[in-house]
Every structure is written in structure tokens, then in C-alpha cells.
Amino acid sequence: MTWKDCITWFMDPFRLAVIFGARIGHHTLGPLIQLVFIILVKRLYVGKFKPGPLPRTYMAREWELTRRWIMNRLLPEADFKGALAVLGKHYEYTSWVYRAMGAKVRRCRLTLSNPS
């Protein structure tokens, strides 16, 4: 196989479309799919966090620490694995993500009045 054959093989229009589609999907759909799995793990295994001190019994305290460790490993930073960069940081979708994670986010209704 010569260099010309190699370049011809890579320049096939279908192959280029698949390569570019995979790169776009990786950067847009990848973070959203990770976010869906994080929300599922949070809802199914971790549950809701309650304010207050750690429980006094050994097993309850260890489970609480394990829950915190799991969430720290899933979301070490607050960017939701890049999903907020895809969705936008100042939109209603961000509130949906926080609500899906169990936070209480108030819906804000903004009404603009016409100044006279």
C-alpha cells in the first residue's frame, strides 16, 4: 500500500462523514449521556441528601460517607462533566439538571412592564 492509496482511503466521502460525525457526537452527545447516567446513579443508589450532622450509628454513618464519596467521584467539579457547556449555563435546562439531581430550584417568572 502506497501513501497515495492511504490518502485515497482516508479521503472517501463516507469515511470523512463518519469521522466528523463521531467527533461531533463525542463532544455534544457524550457529556449528555454521561449526565443521564449520573442522574440515574444519583436517584437509584445515592438518594437525596439531608442537611445536618452525620448519623451516630456506625453503618448509617459509613453509608452516608459512601454516598458522599460516590457523588464526589461522579462529579468532582460542578460542570456536570461538560454537559452545562453543551446546554448553556443560564438557561432553563440548567435548572432541569439541578432538579433532576434533587435540588429545589424555584421557577422565576419575569414580567417586563412598559415604563411610562
Image (cartoon, helix red, strand yellow):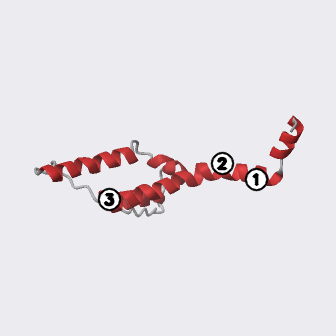
Q: CA distance from mark 3 to mark 2?
A: 32 Å
Tell me: residue 77, above or below residue 90: above
Relative side of 32 to 2, left or right = left
**Residue 58 appears in the rendering:** yes
Q: CA distance from mark 3 to mark 1?
A: 39 Å
Q: Tag 3: Cα neighbours inside 10 Å, few (<14), some, or many (≥20)?
A: few
Tag 3 secondary structure: helix
Which mark, residue 17?
1
Which mark, residue 76?
none
Which mark, residue 45?
3
* Residue drawn at x 26%, y 48% as measured from the top left: 66
Residue type beneath disc 2: Arg
Q: Position of residue 97 (x, y in %)?
A: 42, 58
Q: Toward the viewer: 87 or 111?
A: 87
List the residue tagged with mark 2: 23
Mark closest to the chain's N terminus, 1 or 2:
1
Q: Position of residue 32 (x, y in %)?
A: 52, 55
